Image: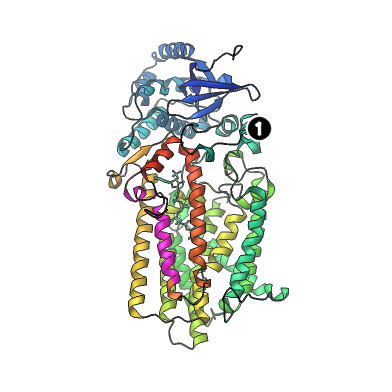
Amino acid sequence: MPSLKYQAGDKVMGRWPGSSLYYEVKVLGYDAKSRLYTVIYKDGTELELKEQDIMSVTSFQQRTRSRSRSNSRSPGRRRSRSRSPARTTRRSSSRTTAAAAAVATDSTPSSRGDKKLKQAAEIKISPIQQQEKKPAENNSNNKHEKKEENNMASKVNEADAKVEVDSEKNLGRYNLRRRKEDGDSKAAEAKPEEREERSSAAPPAAAAASTPLDFGGNIGALVLMLFLPAWVLFLVLQVNQKDPSLTNLPTLPPLETFWDPQALGFVIIWIFFQALLYTLPVGKLSEGVLLRSGRRLTYRTNGFFTFVVSAAVVAAAVYQGADLTYIHSHFLQLTSASFLVSMLLSVYLYVRSRSAGLDERALGGNSGKVIYDFFKGRELNPRIKEFDLKFFCEMRPGLIGWCLINVAMALAEMKQQKLDAPSYSMILVNVFQLIYVVDGLWNEEAILTTMDLMDDGFGYMLAFGDLVWVPFTYTLQANYLVSHPNPLSLPVLTAIVVLKLVGFYIFRKSNSEKNAFRRNPADPRLSHLKTIPTATGKSLLVSGWWGVVRHPNYLGDLIMALAWSLPCGFSHLLPWYYIIYFLILLVHRDSRDMNACRRKYGSAWDKYCRTVRYRIIPGVY
Ligand code: NDP
C-alpha cells in the first residue's frame, strides 16, 4: 500500500464504532474500492475503519498530553481523571470500550453539538491505558464487573463528560467480524458482496441491515407465510376427524364456513379486553434491555394480574350461562378470524415501520427485501404511546387465550363424552399448560431478555405466531382429547407428572439464572458462577445451568412438551405434533441464536462453545 497513510502491520489508534474511544489496533489491509482499512483489535475483533477514524500512536499521545495539561487546571476534571475507569484493574480492554460506549450512548441527547466536552471525554475515558491489562478469562468477578461499570458511569457523569455517538451512522460505516482463524468462521462472516454493501456509504435502510437472512431469505419467508396458515388449517380440520391418522386427510370445507362475523367479534373483544387490562396502571413497571439507541423501554409487567382478572371474568360469564363450548364448535371460524387480525396487524406493522428511525429497526428484519422484512418484522419495539404492541401480543391475547381454549375443550369433552368431570388426560394437559402460561406471566419480566423481545422485529412471524399459532395449535392436545379419549392408569399418570416437574424445574431454573445474570451480573446469588468476558462488555455464564448445555431452557421446555403429549397416548401421531414441531423450532432457534451470538461475541463465543460442548441435550446434541 505505497501511497497510503497507514501500511499493513502498522500499530495505530482506531476508533471504536458507536463511540469516540480509541484503541490500539494493527492495520491488516486496505480495500481501495470501499476506501476502508481493515484493522484488528487486541481481543481479535476485526473492523473496517475509515482513514479519519484512525490516528497514529504519536499524534494520539500528543493529543492526550495536550488535553491532560489543559484539563489539569480544572479541579472537577482532575478528580474525574484520577478515578478514570482506565485505572481499574480487572476489566478487559474491549469490555471497557463497550461499557464506555454504553455509558456514552446514555449521554447522547445532551451531548449533541458539544464538541469540546466530547473531546474531553475522549481523553478522560480513553481506554488506551487499560490495554496494558490482560483480559480476564474464566472466572471473571461479576461483582467487580458491575461495580466497575457503575463506577465508570458515575465518573463519566460526574465529570459531565459527553461523548457524541451516532450508532446507526457507525453501523453503516463499520463492519464488525471475527478473526478468520477462529474455528467455524464461515457462519459468521459476511459474503464479500454483503460486506461491501455494508461498508460503503449505504442508504439508511441498508445501513442497519447487518445480519444474514434467516429462513432462506425472501423465498423462504414467502413459503413460510403460505405454509404456516395452511398447516394450522390442516391441524384444525384433522383433529375433528374420527380417525385423525395421516392416511386419512381431511377435505376442505366450503369457503363460506371460514367466515363468521360473530367469531371475528369475539376475537376482537378478547384482544381489546386484554389490551384494556394491559393499560391499567396496576403492577410493576419493568425495564427492558439497553437498546442500540442507548434507551431502555419500560414495560407494564402485570401479566399475572390480567390472567387472574380474565379468569374471574370468564368464570362469571360461564356462571351467567355463557357456553364456552362455542369455542370448540366454532374453532375453524375463530382461527380464521384470528388469522385475519394477525394479517391486518402485520400490514399495519410493516407500514408504520417505514417511518421508524434506524435505531428503532431490528437488525434482522431490515434487509430491504419486502417479503422477508414483512415476515421477519422491521421495527423492534413498535409502540403506540406507551402501549408496546410486541410485548402485548407475545404475552397476553394468545397466551391467556390458550388457557381459555383449553378450559373450553375440557367442557366440550364433558359434553361430548357425557362425563361429570374432565378425564385425567384432559386434566393433566390443562394443568400442565396452565402452569406453563401462569409461570410465564408470573415471571413476565424474563421475556424482556429473550430473543423475541431483544432481537426480532415485530412482523408477520411474531404476529401470526402470537395470535394464531400459539392459541390454535398449542391447544391441539386438549382439542384431540375432546373426541379421542385416552384413559390413564395411576402409575402412568404419576410418571407423566414427575416428567413434567423435572422439565419445569430445569426450564424455570435456567431461565431465571440467565435473566438474573443479565439484569444484574453482580447479583450475590450468582457470585459462585463462572463467566467468560466478551468484547461487548457482557459476560457469558459458563457454569450452573448454562454450563451443562448451551440451551438448558430449551431442554426443560422439550421435556415438558413430552409430558404434554403423553396423556394423549400413542394411537395417533397428531397430538405428538407439538413436540415434533417444538424440537424443529428449538433446534432452528438454537442455530439462529448461535449465529447471532457468534456475531455478537466473536472469539469469546467460540470459547464458550468449546467449554460447553452440547447445545441442548447433554451428551447427545
Ligand atoms: P434464550 O432465553 O435462551 O436467549 C438466548 C440469549 O441468551 C442469547 O442470545 C444470549 O443473549 C443469552 N445467552 C446465551 N448463552 C448465554 C450464556 N451462557 N450466559 C448468558 N447469556 C447467554 O432464548 P429464547 O428467547 O429462544 O428462549 C426463551 C425461553 O422461551 C426458552 O425457555 C424457550 O424454551 C422458550 N420458548 C418457548 C417457545 C414456545 O413456543 N413455547 C418458543 C420459543 C422459546 P445476550 O447475551 O445478548 O443476553
Give how far across and how far down residue 286 sits, in percent.
Answer: 43, 50
Q: 24 or 582: nearer the eye?
A: 582
Residue 552 counted in the magenta span: yes
Residue 99 counted in the magenta span: no
Q: Quadrant of the N terminus?
A: top right
Q: 486 or 352: nearer the eye?
A: 486
Residue 332 located left or right of residue 44 = right
Q: Disc 1 on helix, strand or loop? A: loop
Residue 603 visible to an observer of this rendering: yes
Picture quarter containing residue 463? bottom right
Give how far across and how far down residue 551 sits, in percent.
Answer: 41, 51
| Residue at the image position 63 percent from the left and 31 percent from the top | 196
As shown in the figure, which amino acid type bears the numbered disc 1?
Answer: Ala
Q: Which residues are magenta?
A: 544-565
Give how far across and how far down residue 503 sits, in percent.
Answer: 37, 62
Q: How is the image coloured?
A: rainbow
Question: Residue under circle 1?
Answer: 202
Q: 265 or 132: nearer the eye?
A: 132
Above or below, comparing residue 152 to residue 63 in the picture: below
Give how far across and how far down residue 477 sits, in percent.
Answer: 49, 73
Above or below, comparing residue 301 to residue 271 in the picture: above
Above or below, comparing residue 46 to residue 589 in the picture: above
| Residue at the image position 55 percent from the left and 28 percent from the top | 112
Residue 109 located left or right of residue 502 = right
Q: Main secondary structure of the magenta part?
A: helix
